[in-house]
């Protein structure tokens, strides 16, 4: 929550504009300038300071010809007398913000609640110009009225003034108190670490959060993953403070956000690593190289949460050692199998929104890998940013630059350094909520488009390789970008298969790639990801015509960079025109086909079809599975008593659609279809879901599909 | 009204007393009498250590100095001290006086890696030895300059025996101020390595690579001196990973 209270606002006026920076008005020598008129040439004018949680935004009128600015800070007492030395705490350089006409600098790295005086001066190269007139203000105390229960909770990091990070036990106690004292939050345990530490998630909603994961998913939630590397604790401290704000603040903005969606915060998925201060988990696994493979319980827990709660936008928090990077390196999901709409919407969040808000509030974002960052910010699907993109979640990475670097010279003091990092993360996570609130409709459209695209199984498969991040002309936060990371030819498969077939050994066999040499089976991991799998007579088929088509080959194809197994590529069994009735026995996959005649899927048989037109009824009774993506059907569709998955995504049907008595715990997926006719679902063992990609139905919806 | 600009990084927001250098130290060679006594005590203690006895003298009495008592620095000195908790901040040196070494380490913000190593290797008990201990504690920056992120993880998780031995290269039986170490001219750590200790500007150089950056945290049963390099003989692996973030 940001309380923006301009403190000493030095009056600006037309005078400043007309006088410009060079002309000196006729004030007597030695007289302090009013901030509007430059007493001396090239003096900064119109300096203001605005307080927010853990930072203060300095803003001023640019001086023509300035190459950079220095921000100086002096601690003062209640009478504005200096009680410590004046220190340059910031260097403003043009590449830190997109709007150089309105320079701003977020001063952070101070004890919240202290009072300061600030001045700013321009430099022409190394030539220092006169300091501005000062502005003074008292920074905000840590959020929450000390006399109000709940609000007055403080983390160990706050009470030790950043000398210590919040311990695991302190986090659990703090979490439990928030859970107990606020109706707006429910804390759920989404899993346990290898050593048995809880992985908690805050679920926020106003006045109370929805009670089931499915109900939460229906609100198109926004999620924050705060701490995956144990030695990068800064974002987690921000999340803990944010949790308190969301739980207890009566700021209309917070209530508005929580009234319109559910906010999910996972403060610590790597509790073992945090306690041991290791990057990896207790086995040494870097969890941010494990979100696709989910060899470890921590990542598997997170992936299950994403499957069940279905956030549509998220951030993943880290810290980063490149001293030349911006304050807040960010990056969209770049893996080339990520649908373009997800990449574009993520870039809109980062460059379209975060950069703009950063320019207003004084923070310096940049594309992760900026300023000589090296071989980072690539397309590994094992990295959560990319895994989520492949799961059609608009998202970004967040890094906090570890040290002060060239632009924050006063961070030799560890407490200052830690505070700047954490409060910059707090700023970012609040902006995520603002973006989601403002752009939920666009995000949902991007997601729906991506899911429809993936389910059509269109285009080449890229195993490793990135969407390019365009560099902007300097000076600009995006003037330096991560490597291009184009896919190598051996990482490209132009002709995507219809499905992968796994042997029982591959699907159900014991694995050794988990903690202590014991890994979950592929059956368990595929279920964690939420994919549709067809158990047929001759093996297990994972069709690509489903929402996570971008991720499936990376894990099941021998050509993958880090696959689980090399499953057998199964290509379409029928393409082109087929006239006459079609009886499906065994496994049939139709791609780019036109079937003129009724289609009957026999018991135990499997029909997979994508980018295909059916002219005639399609009827399946007791099928092993029916998976249709981007199919055009002129006729009725009836799927009854399937033993296995039913998935209908992005199809256009002129006729009734009927799902009856389909079994299994796996809910039929009916998403993004256009149906000119009734949609009826009865007696399905699990209630069909649209995963929040609504269908357009021109006829009654009834039974279990009434709300799809 | 304007303050003279000072580029030095000094924590703000607290009452500042004028900084005075710690009187007991290698840069005040005029103070002879107390040094001789200290030298004798240190030599005896170090001889005992070299001879294989565990522990030496208990903490030799501090040289009384009215100037030192008057300052609020908590007795620590070195170029890094001003960047660490001072005065009444949580973790300030005086507040740690009654804490055992392993607890004190958890309050010094630049020792998170050292602290993790102590806990991973179960050395807390050794740090609470009855004879007192002197800790030459590398800062987090020092560890980052020495080891890559994956190497550090390996040491903390899989290779704890090596880590334990590395830590012993930073521990000295007996509790010694930096001045005592300087006066003795060398120190032998628990792994048997003898390191030269020489005065260097306002602080001291230890061995070939390390300087004390904030010395003389007085804690229960020992002293902690923060140093800017990792001692011992493990290979340097820093810079080997792709950037250890993300």
Image (spheres, rainbow, N blue to C red):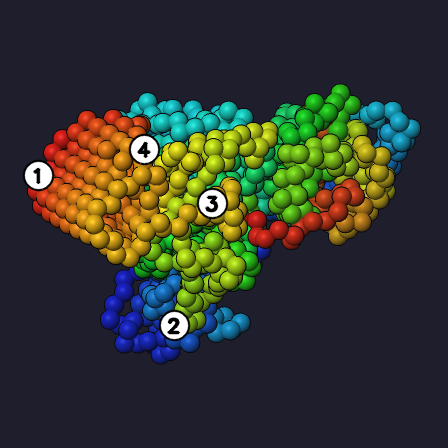
| Residue A150 visible, this angle | yes
Give the residue at mark 2: A63
Pointer 4 or 1: first along the chain: 4
Give how far apart the Cα atoms at labels 4 and 1 are. 30 Å
Give the residue at mark 4: A604
The chain ID associated with circle 4 is A
Q: Are marks 1 and 3 on the same chain?
A: yes
Whether tag 3 and tag 2 are in contact, CB under 8 A, the answer is no
Q: Residues within 10 Å of mark 1 (few under 14, many from 20)?
A: some
Image quadrant occupied by the C terminus of chain A: top left
Residue drawn at x 18%, y 41% as measured from the top left: A637
Residue drawn at x 87%, y 24% as measured from the top left: B53
Give the residue at mark 1: A700
Pointer 4 or 3: first along the chain: 3
Give the residue at mark 3: A568
Nearest-to-viewer mark from 4 and 3: 4
**Closer to us: A154 or A479:** A479
């Amino acid at each position: 929550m940001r309380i923006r209270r301009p403190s000493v606002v030095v009056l600006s006026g037309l005078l400043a504009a007309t006088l410009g920076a060079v002309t000196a008005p006729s004030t007597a020598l030695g007289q302090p300038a009013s901030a509007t008129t430059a007493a001396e040439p090239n003096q900064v004018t119109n300096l203001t300071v605005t307080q927010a949680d853990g930072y203060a935004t300095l803003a001023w009128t640019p001086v023509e010809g300035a190459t950079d600015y220095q921000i100086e800070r002096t601690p003062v007492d209640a009478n504005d007398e200096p009680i410590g030395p004046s220190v340059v705490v910031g260097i403003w350089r043009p590449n830190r913000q997109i709007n150089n006409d309105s320079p701003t600098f977020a001063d952070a790295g101070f004890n919240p609640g202290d009072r300061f005086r600030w001045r700013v001066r321009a430099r022409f190269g190394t030539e220092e110009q006169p300091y501005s007139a000062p502005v003074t203000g008292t920074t905000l105390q840590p959020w929450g009225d000390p006399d109000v229960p709940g609000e007055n909770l403080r983390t160990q990091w706050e009470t030790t003034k950043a000398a210590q990070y919040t311990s695991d036990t302190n986090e659990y106690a703090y979490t439990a108190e928030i859970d107990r004292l606020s109706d707006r939050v429910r804390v759920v345990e989404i899993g346990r670490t290898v050593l048995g530490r809880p992985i908690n998630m805050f679920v926020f909603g106003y006045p109370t959060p929805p009670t089931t994961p499915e109900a939460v998913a229906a609100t198109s939630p926004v999620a924050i993953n705060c701490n995956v590397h144990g030695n990068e604790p800064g974002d987690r401290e921000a999340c803990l403070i944010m949790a308190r704000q969301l739980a207890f603040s009566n700021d209309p903005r917070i209530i508005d956000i929580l009234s319109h969606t559910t906010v999910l915060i996972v403060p610590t998925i790597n509790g073992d690593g945090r306690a041991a201060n290791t990057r990896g988990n207790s086995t040494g696994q870097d969890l941010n190289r494990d979100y696709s493979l989910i060899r470890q319980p921590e990542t598997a827990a997170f992936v299950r949460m994403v499957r069940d709660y279905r956030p549509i936008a998220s951030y993943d928090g880290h810290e980063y050692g490149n001293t030349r990077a911006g304050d807040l390196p960010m990056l969209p999901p770049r893996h080339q199998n990520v649908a373009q709409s997800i990449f574009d919407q993520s870039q809109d969040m980062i460059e379209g929104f975060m950069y703009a808000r950063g320019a207003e509030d004084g923070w310096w974002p940049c594309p992760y890998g900026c300023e000589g960052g090296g071989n980072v910010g690539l397309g590994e699907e094992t990295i959560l940013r990319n895994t989520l993109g492949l799961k059609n979640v608009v998202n970004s990475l967040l890094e906090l630059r570890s040290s002060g670097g060239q632009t924050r010279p006063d961070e030799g003091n560890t407490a200052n350094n830690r505070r700047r990092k954490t409060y910059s993360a707090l700023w970012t996570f609040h902006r995520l909520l603002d973006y989601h609130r403002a752009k939920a409709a666009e995000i949902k459209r991007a997601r729906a488009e991506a899911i429809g695209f993936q389910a059509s199984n269109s285009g080449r498969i890229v195993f490793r390789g990135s969407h390019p991040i365009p560099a902007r002309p300097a000076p600009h936060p995006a003037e330096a970008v991560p490597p291009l990371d184009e896919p190598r030819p051996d990482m490209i498969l132009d002709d995507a298969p219809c499905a992968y077939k796994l042997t029982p050994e591959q699907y159900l066999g014991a694995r050794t790639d988990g903690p202590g040499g014991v890994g979950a089976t592929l059956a368990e991991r595929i279920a964690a990801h939420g994919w549709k799998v067809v158990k047929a007579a001759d093996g297990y088929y994972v069709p690509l015509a489903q929402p996570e088509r971008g991720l499936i080959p990376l894990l099941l194809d021998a050509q993958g960079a880090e696959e689980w197994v090399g499953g057998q590529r199964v290509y379409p069994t029928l393409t082109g025109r087929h006239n006459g009735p079609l009886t499906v026995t065994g496994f049939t996959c139709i791609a780019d086909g036109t079937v003129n005649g009724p289609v009957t899927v026999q018991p135990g048989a499997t029909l997979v079809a994508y980018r295909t037109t059916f002219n005639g009824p399609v009827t399946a009774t007791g099928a092993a599975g029916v998976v249709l993506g981007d199919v055009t059907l002129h006729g009725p569709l009836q799927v009854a008593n399937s033993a296995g998955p039913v998935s209908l995504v992005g199809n256009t049907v002129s006729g009734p659609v009927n799902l009856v008595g389909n079994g299994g715990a796996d809910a039929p997926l009916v998403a993004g279809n256009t149906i000119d006719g009734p949609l009826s679902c009865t007696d399905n063992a699990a209630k069909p879901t649209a995963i929040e990609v609504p269908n357009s139905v021109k006829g009654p919806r009834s039974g279990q599909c009434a709300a799809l | 009204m304007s303050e003279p600009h000072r580029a030095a990084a000094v924590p703000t927001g607290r009452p500042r007393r004028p900084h005075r250098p710690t009187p007991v130290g290698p840069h005040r060679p005029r103070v002879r009498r107390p040094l001789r006594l200290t030298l004798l005590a240190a030599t005896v203690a170090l001889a005992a250590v070299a001879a294989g006895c565990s522990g030496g003298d208990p903490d030799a009495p501090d040289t009384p100095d009215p100037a030192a008592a008057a300052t609020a620095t908590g007795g620590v000195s070195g170029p890094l001290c001003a960047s660490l908790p001072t005065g009444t901040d949580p973790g300030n040196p005086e507040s740690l006086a009654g804490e055992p070494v392993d607890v004190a380490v958890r309050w010094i913000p630049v020792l998170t890696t050292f602290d993790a190593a102590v806990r991973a290797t179960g050395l807390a008990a050794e740090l609470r030895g009855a004879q007192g201990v002197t800790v030459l504690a590398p800062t987090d920056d020092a560890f980052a300059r020495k080891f890559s992120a994956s190497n550090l993880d390996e040491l903390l998780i899989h290779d704890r025996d090596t880590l334990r031995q590395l830590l012993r290269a930073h521990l000295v039986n007996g509790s010694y101020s930096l001045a005592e170490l300087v006066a003795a001219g060398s120190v032998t750590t628990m792994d048997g390595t003898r390191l030269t200790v020489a005065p260097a500007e306002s602080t001291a150089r230890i061995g070939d690579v390390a300087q004390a950056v904030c010395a003389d945290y007085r804690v229960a049963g020992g002293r902690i001196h923060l140093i800017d390099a990792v001692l011992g003989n493990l290979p340097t692996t820093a810079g080997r990973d792709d950037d250890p973030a993300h």
